[in-house]
Image (tube, rainbow, N blue to C red):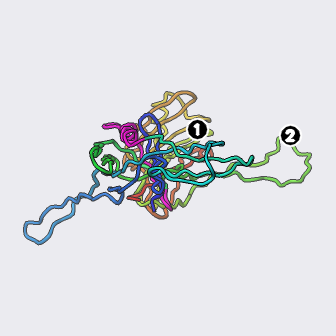
Amino acid sequence: MIRALEVINPSGERLMIELARPEKSGFAVRSIEGLGPVKANIVTTDLANNDGAVFNSARLSYRNIILDLGFYEVYDDIVDDDPVVSSGGWTIGRRSFDTSRNSNGRNNLVRQELSLDIEDIRQRSYLYFPIKKDITLIFYTSNRTVYIKGYVESNEPSIFSYEEGTSISIVCPYPYFRELSNDQVINFSQVDPLFKFAFSSTAQPQLNMSQVSTIVEQDIFYDGEIKTGVVIDIFLSGRIGDLTIYNASLAQTFALNASKIESIIGGQISAGDRIVISSIERDKFITYFKGVDEYNILGAKAKNSTWLGLDHGDNVYTYSVSSGDEYVSFQVSYPVLYEGI
């Protein structure tokens, strides 16, 4: 069940539309189209001498979300602590007024004062759904909180209608919904304790209290519905050789050539350096950080390497280093993608 829709306009202003409380936002959600899986384009080739066709490829187009919103007057509750009326209640038009006594035995009058009329709400829709501009839509449901980015194609209010509202079309070039919470993070290292309290020691001045051990294999369970990319953050504590990372479940291999890295950065790989690899769709990069300097090391990607990803279910990740494996620790983070709400 969809509970609420939040809109973020290009200026960062936010509008929360609760489906069950239209009087709070001024917008009543009458319907929303385009929240299910987007229709796929299946490309086939007809056979000359046989029935049927041969599958070539499949792809998704953009997502088109259409909001049908009604306009709703917004009223503020005003409390008068000493009205000149008797206890009771009455109705004026569509607004109810109630009286009660306060702690001093005097009458309280709670009245509703018009804050935003229909014209104000209509013009408010222009602020939060500006034509041609990019906006973010966040959907709050019973079991998911997801967001999607898009561009406002049209905002068509029915100004002379008895029940005024508007139809808003939003084109989302990337058709998948993304989990709103922070990306999932999997660490390939852990801290192992080397002693337990309480204790006394006359050992050497240097006493190791714990050590960081590397984990060369991790099973990553991905709960999303659409294959997703990953961001691999590699921390180096010394010079290493060629690095290779595998996703055994998808038969993917990604490798970096150490000599090419050192050629690009103009120096040796050393302690304190960091490598970030992103295989996120439309945001793929390989960046090397050395102090305050950043280097694009896409050219160090080994031939025949494939960009790593995650598919629904178990994904077994492992890695190897030709030398200096004790100097490598890293973590894998990834967004969760859904076909629809």
Dividing the picture into quadrants, the one containing residue 60 is bottom left
| Apparent side of residue 35 relative to residue 334 in the rendered image (left or right) | left
86 or 122, nearer to the observer:
86
- Residue 327, horizontal then vertical, whole percent: 61, 43
Quadrant including the N terminus: bottom left
Mark 2 vs 1: CB contact within 8 A = no
**Which residue is at a point 57% across and 43% down the rendered structure image?**
78
The disc labelled 2 sits on which kind of residue?
A: Pro
Residue at the bottom extreme of this rendering: 51
Considering only order in the chain, which callout, 1 or 2, is on the residue closer to the N terminus? 2
The disc labelled 1 sits on which kind of residue?
A: Arg
User: Tag 2: Cα neighbours inside 10 Å, few (<14), some, or many (≥20)?
Assistant: few
129 or 194, nearer to the observer:
129
148 or 152, nearer to the observer:
152
**Which residue is at a point 39% across and 54% down the rendered structure image?**
29
Residue 316 visible somewhere in the drawing = yes
Magenta part of the protein: which range?
117-144
Q: Which residue is mark 2?
A: 205
- Residue 108, horizontal then vertical, whole percent: 64, 47
Name the element at disc 2: loop
| Residue 139 belongs to magenta span | yes
Residue 320 visible somewhere in the drawing = no
Q: How many marks on residues?
A: 2
| Residue 126 belongs to magenta span | yes
Relative to 246, does residue 275 appear above or below in the rendering? above
- Compute the Cα span from label 2 to label 1: 28 Å
Question: Which numbered circle lies on residue 239?
Answer: 1
- Residue 40, horizontal then vertical, whole percent: 27, 59
**Which residue is at a point 50% across and 35% down the rendered structure image?**
288
